[in-house]
Image (spheres, grey):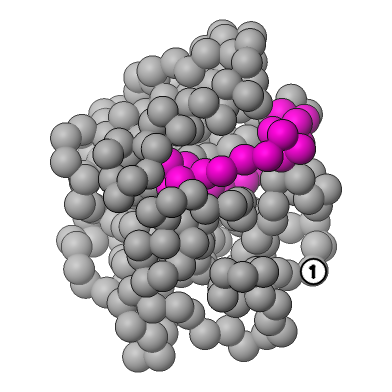
Amino acid sequence: MSVHRVVAAIAAVVTLGGALALAQPPFGRSRFDGPRSTAPDEGVAIDNPPYDGRLTFARIRYTTGPGGYYYNGLPAWAHGYPRAERDLMNIVAEVSDVSLTLDRSEVVALDDSSLFKYPVAYMTEAGFWVMTDKEALALRAYLQKGGFLILDDFRDNFRGGGGWSNFAANMARVLPERRIIDLDVSQRVFHSFFEIDSFDIVRQYYDRGQPVFRGIFEDDDPTKRMMVMINFNTDVANYWEFSATGATPVSESNEAYKLGVNYLIYGMTH
């Protein structure tokens, strides 16, 4: 897929995002046109679409640990919601023939049975992720039955969050028999749609050091299905969220979109 086509697709998102920017501050909550519900005690307006079989971006809602409310007062799981996924899904629609839900995403708890309707799920800020035993069992079942989990936007030593240690402890409860494996660009997830031949394309939005890409595979075998994709020490979705603002070069948003598209396509086909 030519990068020029991605640029054209992003131009459409930029046009949409420019209008939306007038209605909300850069780090503010978004407005919704459809019916609303509110996550208990968290003040986040949730607009879940009715399930109709199309690909829908599913965002995991979890209990937020200490320090996780730093971003405009929102719980950690809601950072970037819903602009990040809306912009990514617009790109997927432009560059593929996938039938998908464009205007809304599903916000779902790990122990909600509706999670099993969605082959791909996304979690942000796993350093602040607090998990119950019931949720651990539910996530284990989801992953073992073919679900694919994407984790993004977390790092160590940040505002009291547990960072990697908190995430690793949670995953050890979910899949105690599996290990976390460092990835290289030969992994199939980086070639499921766009050809990503170097991690050098992944610029940092604000994190220091190099992004770290890791995964969890069936039977700890990198030639088998990846169950969990981990973006550590980076915030790929920040490029999706703010691609329409002109805050960063379009070329950098292009590369972040390539990763997002690849993750979704991989999750649907493996």
Q: Report the quarter where the C terminus lies.
A: top right
> Residue 21 or 250: which is nearer the viewer?
21
Q: Does residue 268 appear anywhere in the picture?
A: no
Is 249 placed above or below 199 here?
below
Identify the residue at horizontal 58%, vertical 84% (top origin).
32
Q: Is residue 234 inside the magenta stretch?
A: no
Residue 93 in percent (x, y) is at 55, 61
> Residue 267 or 73: which is nearer the viewer?
73
> Residue 25 or 262: which is nearer the viewer?
25
Q: Is residue 140 inside the magenta stretch?
A: yes
Q: Report the quarter where the N terminus lies.
A: top left
* In-image side of 217 versus 163 (left or right): right
Amino acid at dot 1: Pro
Q: Residue 201: which quarter of the image?
A: top left
Q: Does residue 29 appear anywhere in the picture?
A: yes
Q: Residue 178: which quarter of the image?
A: top right
Identify the residue at horizontal 56%, vertical 30% (top origin).
170
- What SS does tag 1 mark? loop
Bin the neighbour count of mark 1 within 10 Å (Cα to Cα): few under 14, some 14-19, many 20 and up: few
> Residue 139 or 129: which is nearer the viewer?
129
Magenta highlight range = 118-142
User: Tag count in the figure?
Assistant: 1
Circle 1 sits on which residue? 50
Residue 130 in percent (x, y) is at 56, 43
Is 232 placed above or below 70 here?
above
Identify the residue at horizontal 38%, vertical 78% (top origin).
28
Identify the residue at horizontal 32%, vertical 67% (top origin).
242
